[in-house]
Image (tube, grey):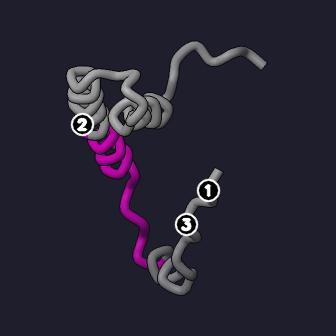
Amino acid sequence: MRKKRHLTIEEKRDWLAFVFRDESGEFSQADKFKAMAEDTRLAVLQAEQHAAEQAATPPPTPALQDILDFLPPPLPPSPS
């Protein structure tokens, strides 16, 4: 399998959260502020991507919607 070249948005946000929540003193307050600002930017980007994906999905037909109404709600993602 080919090694991934770039981090995903989730991986970047996890690292930024680690920097922001650092209590060991490894990162300065300026670093924490920059991490918070970058995380906010990535969150907006992620929300825009999600909205674009939702807009690209055609609405279900009425018959399909009737079937979907009988399905239970999706399960929450399992913690890794």
Determine whether the residue tagged by mark 3 lies in a helix, strand or loop. loop
Residue at 65% of width from left, 50% of height from top?
80
Quarter of image, res 22: top left
Q: Is residue 45 visible?
A: no
Instruction: Looking at the picture, tell me which residue is in the foreground, 27 or 76.
Output: 27
Within 10 angstroms of label 2, few (less than 14), some, or many (20 or more) residues? few
Residue extending farthest to the right is: 1
Q: Nearer the viewer, residue 66 or 45?
A: 45
Q: Nearer the viewer, mark 3 or mark 2?
A: 2
Residue in the picture at 28% in, 22% down: 28
Left or right of residue 25, residue 73 in this image? right
Q: Name the residue: 52% across, 17% down.
A: 6
Q: Could you say which disc has been placed on residue 76 in the image?
A: 3
SS of the residue at dot 1?
loop
Question: In the figure, 21 relative to 68: above or below?
Answer: above
Say if residue 3 shows up in the picture.
Answer: yes
Q: Residue furthest front?
A: 24
**Count the marks: how many?**
3
Q: Between residues 77 and 52, which one lies in front from this camera angle? A: 77
> Disc 2 designates what residue?
40
Kind of residue indicated by mark 3: Pro
What is the spatial separation of the Cα atoms under label 1 and label 2, in whole angstroms?
23 Å
Residue occupied by mark 1: 79
Dot 2 lies on which element?
A: helix
